[in-house]
Image (spheres, grey):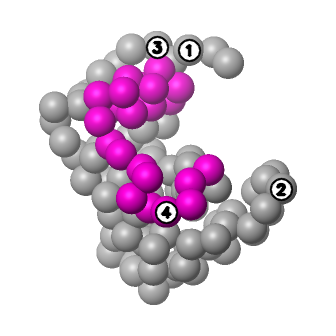
Amino acid sequence: MSYLMIPIWELYYVKELKEISFNDSTSENFKDQRSLFDRKKIYETLQWAEENPNYDFKEIMKNAPVPHKLEFSNKEVYEYLVKFKEFMENEEYGVLTDDRPSIEF
């Protein structure tokens, strides 16, 4: 489940889900920051998440090193994860195929 922390992390930096957009910029940043191996692992966990809507997704972040609480409901986190999965599946972005080396931060 630790791979789900990666997409959920973004939710700490927005007030509403509609602020999150999945586009070319999102794709490029994601590919720069995560290896193809990691992106595929994230996708696998997103597939599992989609099949388990009643799972407590907020619990995954209980020990996250952030100064505030995740403000979204579990249902909202689930809906966001499904959208993130759909973004990853969009072949236009190449998230699951681009094997560029990730950038070290």
Give the quadrant of the N terminus.
bottom right
Q: Which residue is mark 1?
A: 103
Q: Assign a secondary structure to mark 4.
A: loop
Q: Which residue is mark 2?
A: 67
User: For the residue marked with disc 2, what is the amino acid?
Assistant: Pro
Q: In the image, is residue 61 above or below residue 33?
A: below
Q: What is the residue that sits farthest to the bottom in this orientation?
A: 54
* C-alpha gap between disc 2 and disc 4: 18 Å
Give the foreground label among 3 and 2: 2
Marks 3 and 2 close (CB-CB < 8 Å):
no
> Residue 74 placed where, x, y %?
53, 79
User: For the residue marked with disc 4, what is the amino acid?
Assistant: Glu
Characterize the magenta stretch by its predominant secondary structure. helix
* C-alpha gap between disc 1 and disc 4: 29 Å
Do we see residue 54 in this rendering? yes
> Residue 10 placed where, x, y %?
56, 49
Give the foreground label among 1 and 4: 4
* The one of 39 and 31 positioned closer to us in this rendering: 31
* C-alpha gap between disc 1 and disc 3: 7 Å
User: Which contiguous range is marked in magenta?
Assistant: 13-34
Give neighbour class at mark 4: few <14, some 14-19, many 20+ (Cα, 10 Å): few
Give the quadrant of the C terminus.
top right
Q: Is 43 covered by the magenta stretch?
A: no
Give neighbour class at mark 1: few <14, some 14-19, many 20+ (Cα, 10 Å): few
